[in-house]
Image (cartoon, grey):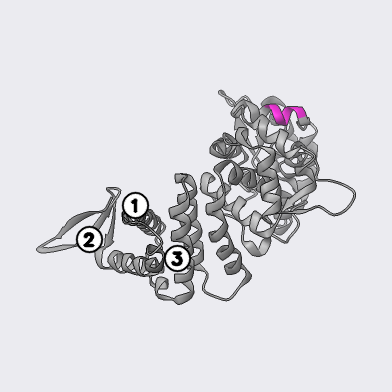
Amino acid sequence: MFKSHKLHTGNITNSNLILINGDVNIDGEVYGEIKNISLDILRNDFEKFSTQAIAQVKTELEHFLETLFDKLEKEKLISLVENFKLPAVQVSLHDTLIGYIISEDIHIKHFIVDVLIDRLKKQNKTIEKSVINEAIKIIPKLALPTACLIALMALRHQVVVMPFSFMFESFFNQLSPIIDNLKDVTKLDVEYIKQNNFTVPITGIFPIDSFENHLLRQYDLFFRQKGSLNKLNEFTEIHPEIRSCVNDAGSCMVSMSGENSEHWQFCDANSTLFYNRLKERQQEYLIPLVEELKKNMPIFSEREVREYLISINSNWSFAFDLLNSDALRKLELSIIGKYIGSKLVSRHTHSNSPSISNFSKPIAL
């Protein structure tokens, strides 16, 4: 909850600050103004509630504002609160508050606040704003397993780029809160996302490929057997240019792995993106060497991809079974589904979600 907090600076005492979660100070007047706006927005809704329910709503409002200001301050976006004075934003705020109140899951509540912050950033009349407005209305209706199913499907619609490929293990670990909920997904969840326009049917003869093959295509340099350091050293003696800097971080194309650095792997995870960068850097001469090195590192089989992720979290077995089911292989996410799914993935992996304007672009590489 909020606590009054005095800040002493020299001989000046500022008592108009509010302390959130023990480490975030906000201006009390700003907080009070947004709280009053929120209460005004909910005034007509209060007429539908009992006295006891209104008290509970006001408690929920305190929790909402605490979460909102905490995120805005930590992301250095506190100036966005000025947008709450705009009528269009107040409509979105009303929908957000109602959704926050009716949602019974704390994870969904926090997710709703994340989406509202996206809405605060969008003031121009764009399709992105329309998608976010729709997401604000529909997210509170989602059960957590259903939301996690949408997030899982979003993984088929994006290519994650890491500075170094060894970071992917951490990425897959960070997805565990999503993966752990997939065991509770039922046929009803699949029907729900179909009937509520989170998905669109795939037209044509061929369904979506297996998730294992998707991962092998999108991360073909990562899902490989580790290379022998001895063989790499032999190759380097003949082709010392593979030690050339190939990115802005100043690293070469390979990194060591294993407890005693007895193995190596590529720093990049996707060969197409890697080759495009080499061409931009006028280093095309390195591409044949990469292809030669790949021959000494057999790519995983579908079974090995599956086993690798299950070794990180056994619940990945549910993920593969769901994505490879006949029902989901004939569905892809709609724009609203892609936004919600990718936003949830980025929330857990602390990464930037793809721009909505890029959702219509194919991901095949």
Q: Position of residue 195 (x, y in %)?
A: 70, 53
Q: Which residue is mark 1?
A: 56
Is residue 133 located in the magenta-colored stretch of the structure? no
Does residue 225 appear in this view? Answer: no
Q: Which residue is mark 2?
A: 17
Sequence-first tag of 2 and 3: 2
The extreme right residue here reads: 205
Q: Which residue is mark 3?
A: 93
Mark whose residue sits in front, 2 or 3: 3
Secondary element type, mark 3: helix
In the picture shown, does residue 107 fall above or below 301?
A: below
Do the residues bearing badges 2 and 3 touch, measured as CB atoms within 8 Å?
no
Residue at the left extreme, as displayed? 11
Give the CA separation, mark 3 to mark 1. 18 Å
**Left or right side of 5 for 323:** right
Tell me the kind of residue under disc 1: Gln
Front-most of residues 130 and 101: 101
Residue type of the residue flagged with mark 3: Leu
Measure how far apart labels 2 and 3 are at the Cα level. 24 Å
- Vertical relation: 324 (above or below) 99: above
Q: Amino acid at mark 2?
A: Leu
Which dot, 1 or 2, sits closer to the camera?
A: 1
- Residue name at image x 62 percent, y 24 percent: 262
Q: Considering depth in this image, is 82 or 226 the residue closer to the camera?
A: 82
Q: Main secondary structure of the magenta part?
A: helix
Q: How many marks?
A: 3
Task: Calculate the distance from the C-alpha at mark 1 to the C-alpha at mark 2.
Answer: 25 Å
State which region is magenta.
Answer: 303-307
